[in-house]
Image (tube, helix red, strand yellow):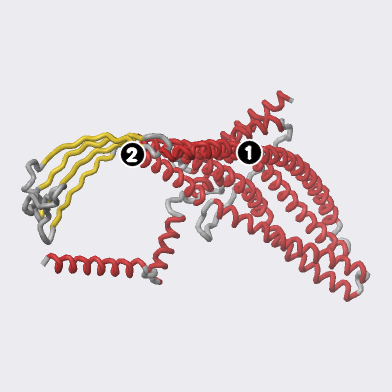
């Protein structure tokens, strides 16, 4: 009878296993995929504050950080790392294990006694265990090795929390740099795109007029072809610049995590002046070595690897385990059905000591590798700071040159406009001058955007934090005000300190 029950149990387990396997391997249906897409779209753009007015630079930065999915991912990774620290800390506690069960035999257990000298049976077969009886245990155990390993693991998890925080800081800095670059290009796009469209229509009209003037002999053929060539070049450049302007708005919308098709305006205000490049580069290098997230993350990683070596060394030495428990057995043949037990055990794998020299050498080499990796990263950071400063100098000079070019082209345009009513070639010259002036305006906005991007790269190369640690608890306006205050204070105090040291 017991064998039949066992066979039935085995068949039931096999049937459940087959059913569970078939369920796990079933693919998602088309309706489930569509439902998942719909849910993902809602989650990507959920709980966003609506845009009710033109967006300033600091508001764009705040939106990019508050709703950026990469940043939210790093934030969740930091939270997960903190949860893992709590899990690891619980592993340092003793183990309190409660168990219960029953046993059922098909026959009686038991035995006989046989004489050692003569081999004769001295007792008849007997048993001291029932065929069926219940068991229950509650046992507390604690090991010094488990405690040491759990303690070192918890230290590692805490360092990994700090590493995740440094990665979060890096995402913040990269997002701010991208927003700075895209925002000012979007400002230029908003100001110029209507003028570009209007000028493209007038340039095409001018091309038709130039061809007509050539056909009727109003202009020398060589001069008419030269005008056409200049206007065609202008059309090509304006079309390319128009694409750049459109992409700038799309890029800014993506950085702010706006739903596709969202209509918004950037604040059409006078761009702030480009800061003077009176920077103390050695001072900036010192700030970079203090603040860069990559260096701090690498430093924390060294402590993580050191904990691995300490765990390996702890396994070389004796470890003590303690256990105490209470037990119950329903076996009626026992004299005592309940009892308590306590024990201490010391164990030591003596051959593990052979690994000690290798572990010591591995630890020393690991520290050297970590130090060299950090030094190489520090050298790269110093190079980035110097390159970022040099690029800012060059970008500022390029902006000044573009600004002067725009002024000159504006004066040429005014002169061509004044003489446009005199002759046909004067009208064509005005169109060409107008196109050159608009291109100069684009170059000026592009140069300003490049200078702002270079300034942002300088921020990024130093590793400065420009916002509060907790983003989700603040609205966009509060975050924007905090970002603006931090950036303004840093620029004022740092530039003032640098000018005093120079």
Camera-side residue: 187 or 14? 14
Q: Position of residue 125 (x, y in %)?
A: 8, 54
Q: On the rendered structure, is 266 left or right of 142?
A: right
Quarter holding the N terminus? bottom left
Q: Quadrant of residue 131?
A: bottom left
Q: Position of residue 230 (x, y in %)?
A: 84, 63
Quarter holding the C terminus? top right
Of the numbered discs in the image, which one, if any, rests on residue 90?
2
Q: Position of residue 255 (x, y in %)?
A: 56, 52
Camera-side residue: 347 or 324? 347
Q: Residues within 10 Å of mark 2 (few under 14, many from 20)?
A: few
Q: On the rendered structure, is 168 left or right of 215?
A: left
Q: Residues within 10 Å of mark 1 (few under 14, many from 20)?
A: few
Q: Position of residue 338 (x, y in %)?
A: 11, 41
The residue singled out by tag 1 in the image is 372
Which residue lies at the image location 71% right of the left edge and 23% below the top edge? 500
Camera-side residue: 477 or 306? 306
> Can the viewer see residue 478?
no
Task: Report helix, strand or loop for mark 1.
Answer: helix
Q: On the rendered structure, is 291 left or right of 155?
A: right
Which residue lies at the image location 88% right of the left edge and 76% below the top edge? 215
Q: CA distance from mark 1 to mark 2?
A: 35 Å
> Can the viewer see residue 210?
yes
């Amino acid at each position: 009878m017991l064998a039949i029950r066992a066979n039935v149990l085995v068949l039931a387990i096999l049937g459940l296993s087959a059913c569970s396997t078939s369920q796990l391997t079933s693919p998602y249906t088309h309706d489930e995929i569509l439902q998942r897409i719909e849910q993902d779209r809602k989650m990507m753009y959920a709980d966003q504050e609506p845009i009710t007015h033109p967006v300033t630079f600091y508001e764009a930065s705040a939106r990019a950080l508050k709703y950026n999915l990469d940043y939210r991912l790093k934030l969740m990774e930091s939270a997960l790392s903190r949860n893992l620290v709590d899990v690891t800390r619980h592993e340092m506690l003793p183990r309190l294990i409660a168990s219960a069960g029953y046993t059922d035999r098909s026959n009686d257990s038991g035995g006989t006694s046989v004489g050692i000298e003569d081999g004769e049976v001295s007792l008849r077969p007997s048993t001291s265990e029932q065929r069926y009886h219940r068991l229950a245990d509650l046992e507390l155990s604690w090991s010094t090795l488990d405690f040491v390993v759990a303690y070192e693991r918890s230290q590692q998890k805490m360092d990994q929390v700090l590493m995740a925080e440094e990665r979060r800081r890096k995402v913040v800095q990269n997002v701010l740099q991208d927003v700075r670059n895209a925002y000012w290009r979007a400002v230029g796009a908003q100001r110029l795109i209507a003028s570009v469209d209007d000028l493209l229509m007038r340039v095409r009209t001018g091309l038709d007029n130039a061809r007509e003037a050539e056909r009727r002999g109003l202009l020398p053929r060589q001069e008419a072809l030269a005008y056409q060539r200049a206007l065609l070049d202008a059309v090509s450049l304006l079309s390319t610049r128009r694409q750049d302007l459109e992409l700038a708005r799309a890029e800014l919308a993506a950085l702010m995590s706006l739903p596709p098709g969202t209509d918004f305006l950037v604040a059409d205000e006078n761009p702030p002046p480009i800061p003077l490049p009176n920077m103390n580069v050695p001072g900036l290098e010192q700030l970079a070595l203090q603040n860069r997230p990559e260096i701090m993350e690498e430093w924390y990683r060294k402590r993580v690897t050191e904990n691995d070596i300490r765990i390996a060394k702890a396994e070389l030495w004796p470890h003590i385990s303690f256990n105490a428990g209470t037990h119950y057995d329903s076996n009626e043949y026992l004299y005592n059905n309940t009892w308590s037990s306590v024990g201490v055990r010391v164990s030591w794998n003596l051959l593990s000591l052979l690994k000690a020299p290798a572990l010591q050498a591995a630890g020393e080499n690991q520290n050297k590798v970590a130090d060299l990796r950090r030094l190489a990263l520090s050298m790269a950071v110093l190079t980035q700071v110097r390159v970022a400063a040099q690029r800012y100098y060059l970008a500022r000079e390029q902006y000044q040159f573009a600004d002067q070019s725009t002024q000159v082209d504006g004066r040429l345009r005014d002169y061509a406009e004044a003489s446009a009513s005199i002759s046909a070639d004067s009208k064509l010259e005005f169109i060409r001058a107008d196109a050159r002036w608009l291109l100069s305006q684009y170059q000026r906005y592009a140069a300003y955007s490049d200078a702002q991007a270079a300034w942002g790269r300088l921020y990024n190369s130093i590793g400065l934090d420009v916002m509060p640690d907790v983003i989700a608890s603040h609205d966009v306006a509060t975050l924007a005000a905090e970002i603006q205050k931090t950036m303004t204070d840093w620029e004022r105090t740092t530039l003032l300190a640098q000018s005093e040291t120079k």
